[in-house]
Amino acid sequence: MSVYRRTLVYFKPFMGQTMVATLLTLCSIALNLLKPVPIRFIIDDVLLAPSRGEKFLAAHHISAMSPATIILGLCVSLVAIQLLSGVAGLFTSLIFVKVGLQALLKLRTELYAYLQSLPLKYHDARRSSDSSFRVAYDSQAIQTIYNKGFSNIFNSVITLVCTFLVMWRMDWVLTLLSLGILPLIVAAIYFYADRIRSQSTTIQERESAVLAVAQEGLSSIRMVHAFGREEFEVSQFSRHARESLEANLKLTMTSVSSALVIGTLMAAGTALMYYAGSLHVLSGRLTLGSLQQFAAYLLMLYAPLESLTYTVWALEGAAAGAQRCFEVLDKEDEVKNAPNAKNLGPAKGAVTFENVAFGYDPKRLILQDVSLAVQPGETVAFVGGTGAGKTTLLSLIPRFYDPTAGRLLLDGEDLRAITKKSLRNQISIVLQDTVLFSTTIRENIAYGRPDATEEEIIEAAKRAEAHNFIQAMPDQYRSQVGERGSHLSVGQRQRIGIARAFLKNAPILLLDEPTSALDPATEHAIMDTMKDLMKGRTTLIITHRIATVHGIGKIVVLQNGRIAETGSGAELLARGGVYATLYRAANITS
């Protein structure tokens, strides 16, 4: 399906408004066709042949008027026609712009919602700035397609047809001569159209790259300053910005040269009409006023032709942006709900891995043949070297990814038979670097339960031992945390994350390196709070710090994506296997 046909879906809800705008467009065109008529009367019936004007007035039983009065009346009629045409055009433009913006809102919302639903595998392979660019900028193409596409094309085609019919009735020979350039214009349009679409696509990609570099450099400004890499970052940005500039210049050259070709062709057609029309006036076949009227209609004929030319090129540019939006919407959700997926009620928390294998690339597996049963309320720690697959294993439980082979069960139900939303409602997650949004502390704590009461939020903060430092802040729970929580310390951010988990009160708790970024004293305090959070919940925790989990009842050791050992810390240490090696490397003594 073409880009243009796909965009029609976004305009169907607004067909009523489009019909009103269409009727107003027809009124405006009809009024525009009347504009040259008073000019012809002034020239032929008042200035050059006043007797003919008097006969016209007498035939219509209008009392004789002076030439000045007649001219004044005709000039007033010109202003009235222009005013009525302008009012119709004003309301037409307002309606078309409104419909275009409504369609833009619909596409942006759908695009953003679909990006939110796509699995992490999709986002892992792309820069977030590119997705942001498609939502914020590429999506605007749909407004261009509507406002410069449908409205311009409809207006231009109707104007062309009506103007052609009027001109044909006036002088068919001059009309054919005037349209002699049409095949050349069509050829020029096709010649430049492909170039403009290709160059527009290049611009979109390079503008996206500029945004990506700027976003990455500014979001990592502390690191840039720390390593004195300001000049390098500026040079990187400058290089991408220069490439964007060159792409824009190339498109501008194409547009300017195409405009020159089209303008020259139209000038040639106008010159040919004036030459032949002047001969018709000299031979008496056409009056001077009629020639002037015909010339006005010729301008009205060429104007929509020129408009159509630029519309085609604008559409080709817009099509490049729209195609980038549809590329996202066409991307298959690899972790989608099964057709018969059911909503899960309150879970007990039994998590089972059955021969699970996973790889971001099916040819390179990260996890292989993982089988494990976690009982409701049980706490299990996963340890292993870097790259052993610990974080990946935890990511399979909320279905951030689906296993390449095998299956995961929750309370005996295959996760793929459960809707993602109801599954994730059963899970709380505390990460190594707690993600906070640029809003208030209250909203961040309530992120998983936006309907929570003030009392519930405060209680969760107290259980996470965050209430005291929140109360000490100027606006307390209404305090802004800054971008990614920059106004808070690492320990404070972590406690906000724990409070969020307390408030959600889910039966399954996933802890991904929850203390690795903390100093020993803060880690000890956080772990005391975490133990309270873990009570009565099925808890899976991964960490590099063996001391944090050595006393936990069940430890699973991962090595090269497989389960190497399972047991308590003391049992694993006595075996002298992988865990014992990790234990000794951490300089831990029993």
Image (spheres, rainbow, N blue to C red):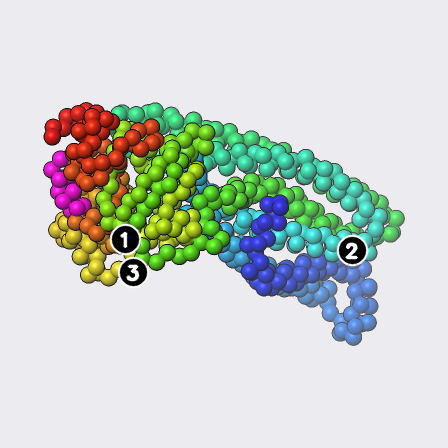
Question: Main SS of the magenta segment?
Answer: helix
First in sequence, mark 1 or 3: give its number: 3
- Disc 3 residue type? Asp
The location of residue 348, given as percent across then percent down, is 29, 54
Q: CA distance from mark 1 to mark 3?
A: 15 Å
- Disc 2 residue type? Leu
Q: Residue at x 88, y 48 (%)?
A: 283
Query: Is 139 placed left or right of 430 in the picture?
Result: right
Asked if the stretch drawn in magenta spans residue 525, the answer is yes
- Disc 1 residue type? Ala
Q: Secondary structure at mark 1?
A: loop
Disc 1: CA contacts within 10 A as few (<14), some (14-19) or many (>=20): some
| Front: mark 3 or 2 | 3
First in sequence, mark 2 or 1: give its number: 2
In front here: 470 or 319? 470
From which residue to which does the magenta span run?
A: 520-531
Per the image, the residue denoted by label 2 is 165
Q: Residue at x 27, y 52 (%)?
A: 507
Asked if the stretch drawn in magenta spans residue 583, the answer is no
Disc 3: CA contacts within 10 A as few (<14), some (14-19) or many (>=20): few
Residue 64 in sight in this render: yes
Per the image, the residue denoted by label 1 is 506
Q: Residue at x 18, y 33 (%)?
A: 571
The location of residue 56, given as percent across then percent down, is 80, 68
First in sequence, mark 3 or 2: give its number: 2
Q: From what the image shows, is residue 227 above or below residue 61? A: above
Q: CA distance from mark 3 to mark 2?
A: 66 Å
Per the image, the residue denoted by label 3 is 451
Q: Secondary structure at mark 3?
A: loop
